[in-house]
């Protein structure tokens, strides 16, 4: 039997802030269904560019705003699990977001947990190997910003 599931495309952020003189921290949130650590992400929002959709998802899911890069730093794949048990493959384009504001309240605050991680700890917390690789490489990207 062949797999005919169609892959969906999503847009997310790798939300970050400076920590100490040369360090970086990354923000992850828990997914609603499986409570795994993930970056804020979601489907395209009509009328918004991909990076704008990513920034909007960052606010709705994690309550953060900031300076979003217009170019994705990479992609990763995961299996999106629906409440009814269906699984849909997803491709996520990640955009760096330098966090300048953390809201005290935001739309999904009662559905998710948000936490700042050191890059190595964030890489260890996620399930997807290609996402972990992007996270581990991210401090090298920041030194160019």
Image (cartoon, rainbow, N blue to C red):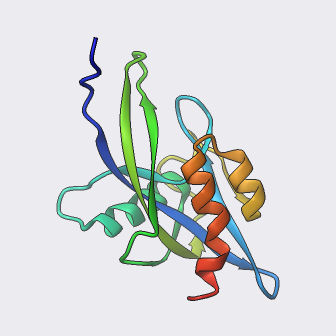
- What residue do we see at 43% from left, 16% from top? 85
In the rendered image, which quarter contains the C terminus? bottom right
Would you say residue 38 is visible in this rendering?
A: no
101 shown above or below 55: below
Would you say residue 41 is visible in this rendering?
A: yes
116 shown above or below 80: below
- What residue do we see at 54% from left, 64% from top? 14
Task: Specify the farthest residue to the front.
Answer: 1
The answer to which quarter of the image holds residue 84 is top left
Is 119 on the left-hand or right-hand side of 128? right
72 shown above or below 9: below
The answer to which quarter of the image holds residue 6 is top left
Task: Residue 9 in the image: state x and y as whole percent.
Answer: 30, 48
Task: Residue 16 in the image: state x and y as whole percent.
Answer: 62, 71
Task: Specify the farthest residue to the top.
Answer: 1
Task: Residue 115 in the image: state x and y as whole percent.
Answer: 70, 55
In the rendered image, which quarter contains the N terminus? top left
Q: How many marks?
A: 0
Most foreground residue, 128 or 125: 128
Task: Residue 47 in the image: state x and y as whole percent.
Answer: 17, 63
- What residue do we see at 38% from left, 19% from top? 86
Task: Specify the farthest residue to the right.
Answer: 20
Is 140 on the left-hand or right-hand side of 40? right
């Amino acid at each position: 039997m062949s797999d005919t599931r169609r892959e969906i495309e999503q847009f997310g952020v790798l939300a970050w802030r400076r920590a100490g003189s040369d360090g970086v921290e990354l923000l992850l949130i828990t997914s609603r269904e499986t409570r795994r650590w993930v970056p804020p992400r979601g489907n395209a929002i009509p009328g918004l560019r991909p990076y704008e959709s990513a920034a909007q998802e960052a606010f709705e899911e994690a309550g953060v705003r900031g300076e979003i890069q217009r170019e994705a730093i990479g992609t990763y794949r995961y299996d999106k699990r629906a409440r009814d048990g269906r699984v849909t493959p997803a491709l996520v384009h990640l955009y760096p977001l330098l966090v300048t504001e953390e809201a005290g309240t935001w739309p999904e605050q009662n559905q998710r947990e948000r936490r700042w991680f050191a890059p190595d700890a964030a890489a260890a917390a996620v399930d997807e190997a290609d996402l972990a690789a992007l996270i581990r490489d991210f401090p090298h990207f920041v030194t160019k910003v």
